[in-house]
Amino acid sequence: MAEKKIRRRGQALVDAILAATWEQLQVKGYQALTIEGVARAAATTKTVLYRRWPDKAHLVLAALSKYDNFTGYVVPDTGALRTDLLDLMGQIAAFLEKLKGETFRGLLAERLQHLELDKLMSRANGNAAIRGIMQPMLDRAAKRGEITRTDWPDRVINLVGILLINEVVSRQELSQAARNEMVDDILLPVFGQQGNSH
Amino acid sequence: MAEKKIRRRGQALVDAILAATWEQLQVKGYQALTIEGVARAAATTKTVLYRRWPDKAHLVLAALSKYDNFTGYVVPDTGALRTDLLDLMGQIAAFLEKLKGETFRGLLAERLQHLELDKLMSRANGNAAIRGIMQPMLDRAAKRGEITRTDWPDRVINLVGILLINEVVSRQELSQAARNEMVDDILLPVFGQQGNSH
DNA sequence: GACTATAAGATACGGCCGTATCTAATTAAA
DNA sequence: TTTAATTAGATACGGCCGTATCTTATAGTC
């Protein structure tokens, strides 16, 4: 008569929780998602969640990286620095798009309050990752004679990411026109390619 | 025998609340400051606070603009675009400094979640305000022959602010060296002044 | 199969959020 | 001065946070 109380454990439990997180994220959005709500939806308790993830941001990132296949970026090689930059921006834009804006802003906001989250956001933030993509692009551009200098400091390398993030945050969208403007008015002049902006 | 119950009203009450807010901000910092805590400290209730300010961010901004005299920026006129830019950055840096970093990040985070706050933050964010300062600088630089173009889009004009904000957020400081680098490696090239970076 | 370490689940806590409702003090109007 | 309109203050609500504690199911070990 008494119902069996089956308990999920380990990976099975994690999977169930992340599934619930993902579903809540779709239904309610980042802001309205709560730890307790996810726990309820996953038919467990928040105690269990707090044992694994320190806060909402980490939980959501875990779900994101499980479901929203975070494929890495590809180093563009289109034959010209300008189109390389536009291609890269397109890739990042697609990534930000998937985060649905509101989720992205939520994660960013959380990052501002708990700076440790930095590392996890390195993809969107683009610290080390971006250099790995930019450097080959710049080296090739130099070889082609488009630019002369290739040893740029982090601040310059990260500029692409900063511009995109700011665009999403302040205008809530990331149009092709905006990307063109950023490349032609800002990035190309910075990298020292003058004259053939378009 | 029964104590008189004197009630503060209007401005007197607002003043007391803002004083309490300011004090709590010093003592606890932005994150740990709570509406209920301020209400307690001001010997009133949160009902009263919510009748005037929609959230913590607005309350703190109100206190800031009352106590931390938000003096406006002065349009630099040092005789060269480079030093003008450095001067402006210095002014903004001083403003950000006063916000104690943590408060700034807190306000920024809040802004990400409730985008309406945008307007209030326009000083730090620098939408319309920044153009009013940048444009005369650029016009003068053009007259001097340092640059040729002066009709820059918002995205370019706002770059100064974006760079500074990003610096504070990601590195938690804003050194003179960093400002020099931003001016020499990014801003001057963007505005088209090549060759005399330093 | 019995025993033990581990981890899930249940429950409760104090604290804060933001809202609603009611009362009582104060001010302005009549 | 009495009356009416404001607005401060008190209280209570449901909801969530993050932590602590305790019970109980599960897995591995002897």
Image (tube, coloured by chain):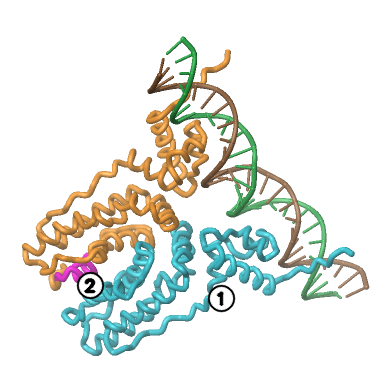
Chain colours: A cyan, B orange, C brown, D green
Residue A141, numbered circle: none
- As helix, strand or loop, the secondary structure at mark 2 comes to helix
Residue A87, picture quadrant: bottom left
**Front residue of this view, candidates D9 and D3:** D3
The prevailing secondary structure element of the residues shown in magenta is helix
Residue B177 seen by the camera? no
Point out residue A78 in the picture as x, y percentages from the top left corner.
31, 88
- Name the image quarter holding the C terminus of chain B: bottom left
- Residue B33 within the segment the image draws in magenta: no
Left/right of residue A55 with respect to residue A79 in the rendered view: right
| Residue under the point 20% across and 70% down | B190
Of label 2 and label 1, which has the lower sequence position? Answer: 1
Q: Amino acid at mark 1?
A: Tyr
- Figure check: A145 above or below B157: below
User: Which residue is tagged 2?
Assistant: A185
Count of numbered badges drawn on the protein? 2
Q: Amino acid at mark 2?
A: Asp
Say which quarter of the image contains residue B153: bottom left
Q: Which residues are magenta?
A: B183-193
